[in-house]
Amino acid sequence: MVNQKFRDLGVMTVLLRRMYSQRLPRIMMLKEKVDGGARLDHYDISYLEHILADTRSIQPTIERHPEYHQLAARVIGLYKAVIDQAVENERRT
């Protein structure tokens, strides 16, 4: 159990650093893009697919740590907003 806690702490540290340095800036750029009415290109869609797969793989770690549930929900909500707007933009064209 102690080893799992240390492992989770390490995983969460890396995930939080990655989120703030890489993923949050990227999703904010995508949000600005789709909010402006633009369509996502192949690279953007591949990025979102990668993020969704990555999210599924870390789900057990998040579930073990309720202190991260609200943050995870907000980040997932941001990705959902981008995807929903991208779908709407595709429908308009």
Image (tube, rainbow, N blue to C red):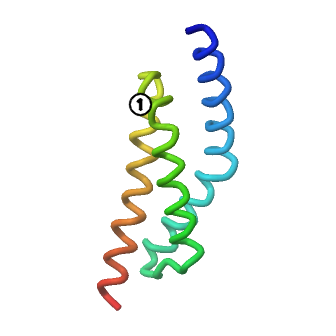
In this picture, is 10 found above or below 32?
A: above
Q: Quadrant of the C terminus?
A: bottom left
Please give the name of the residue rendered at 68% of the width and 38% of the height, measured from the top-left corner.
17
In this picture, is 8 found above or below 19?
A: above
* Residue 87: x %, y % from top left: 34, 74
Please give the name of the residue rendered at 37% of the width and 57% of the height, measured from the top-left corner.
80
* Residue 49: x %, y % from top left: 50, 62
Badge 1 marks a residue whose secondary structure is helix
In the image, what residue type sits under mark 1?
His
* Residue 4: x %, y % from top left: 58, 17
Figure label count: 1
Circle 1 packing at 10 Å, graded few (<14), some (14-19), many (20+), is few
Q: Nearer the viewer, residue 53 or 28?
A: 53
In this picture, is 26 found above or below 87?
A: above
Q: Nearer the viewer, residue 80 or 33?
A: 80
Residue sitting farthest toward the bottom? 93
Please give the name of the residue rendered at 30% of the width and 84% of the height, measured from the top-left corner.
91
Q: Which quadrant would residue 9 be assigned to in this image?
A: top right
Q: Quadrant of the N terminus?
A: top right
Q: Which residue is mark 1?
A: 69
Q: Is residue 65 left or right of residue 88?
A: right
Q: Is residue 8 left or right of residue 36?
A: right
Q: Nearer the viewer, residue 22 or 58?
A: 58
* Residue 34: x %, y % from top left: 45, 73
In this picture, is 92 found above or below 86?
A: below
Please give the name of the residue rendered at 59% of the width and 74% of the height, measured from the top-left corner.
43
